[in-house]
Image (spheres, rainbow, N blue to C red):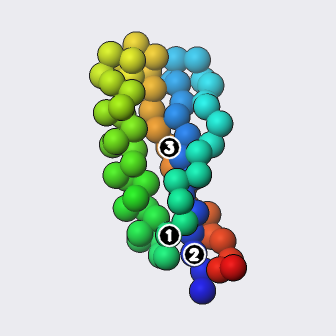
Amino acid sequence: MIKYVLIMKICSALSGNCLPEHNGGVHDSWYDCAAAGSLNTLNAMAELGREDVNNRKLFVTFKCDPVSDA
């Protein structure tokens, strides 16, 4: 069975730099991974805060990569 690992990173459109990728956990389906990525993106933006996001032009990206069930 294929599972999917959620990979997230925070980037700045101002500087063009990104923080290292962060493992957001393994999920049983593409849907579960994509939904978790969407929710985690909103949570990360809230944690970063409006002022920091606006000043540094921050954004959060995510992807779901397949992994073999071990």
| Residue 20 figure quarter | top right
Q: Could you say which quadrant of the image residue 58 lies in?
A: top left
Q: Nearer the viewer, mark 1 or mark 3?
A: 1
- Residue 49, relative to residue 33: is it above or below? above
Q: Is the C-beta separation of discs 1 and 3 under 8 Å? A: no
Task: Name the residue located 41 percent from the left edge and 69 percent from the top edge.
Answer: 32
Q: Residue furthest bottom?
A: 1
Alpha carbons under labels 2 and 3: distance apart: 20 Å
Say how many tags the image has. 3
**From what the image shows, is residue 10 above or below residue 49?**
below
Give whichever of 70, 1 is nearer the camera: 70
The amino acid marked with disc number 1 is: His
User: Gap between marks 1 and 3, in whole Å?
Assistant: 17 Å
> Are dots 1 and 2 in contact, CB under 8 Å?
yes
Q: Residue at x 39, y 48 (%)?
A: 40
- Dot 1 or dot 2: first in sequence order is 2
Left or right: 47 with respect to 58? left
Q: CA distance from mark 1 to mark 2?
A: 6 Å
Question: Which disc, if any, is residue 3?
Answer: 2
Q: Which residue is mark 3?
A: 61
- Look at 66% across and 71% down and name the residue there: 67
Q: Residues within 10 Å of mark 3 (few under 14, many from 20)?
A: some
Q: In this image, 33 relative to 54: left or right?
A: right
Query: In the image, residue 49 lies at what x, y percent?
Result: 33, 24
Instruction: Identify whether 31 is placed above or below 54.
Output: below
Give the mark nearest the N terminus, 2 or 3. 2
Q: Residue at x 31, y 33 (%)?
A: 46
Q: Please, what secondary structure does the residue beneath circle 2 have?
A: strand
Quarter of the picture holding the N terminus: bottom right
Which amino acid type is marked by label 2?
Lys
Instruction: Read off the residue under disc 1.
Output: 27
Give the secondary structure at mark 3: strand
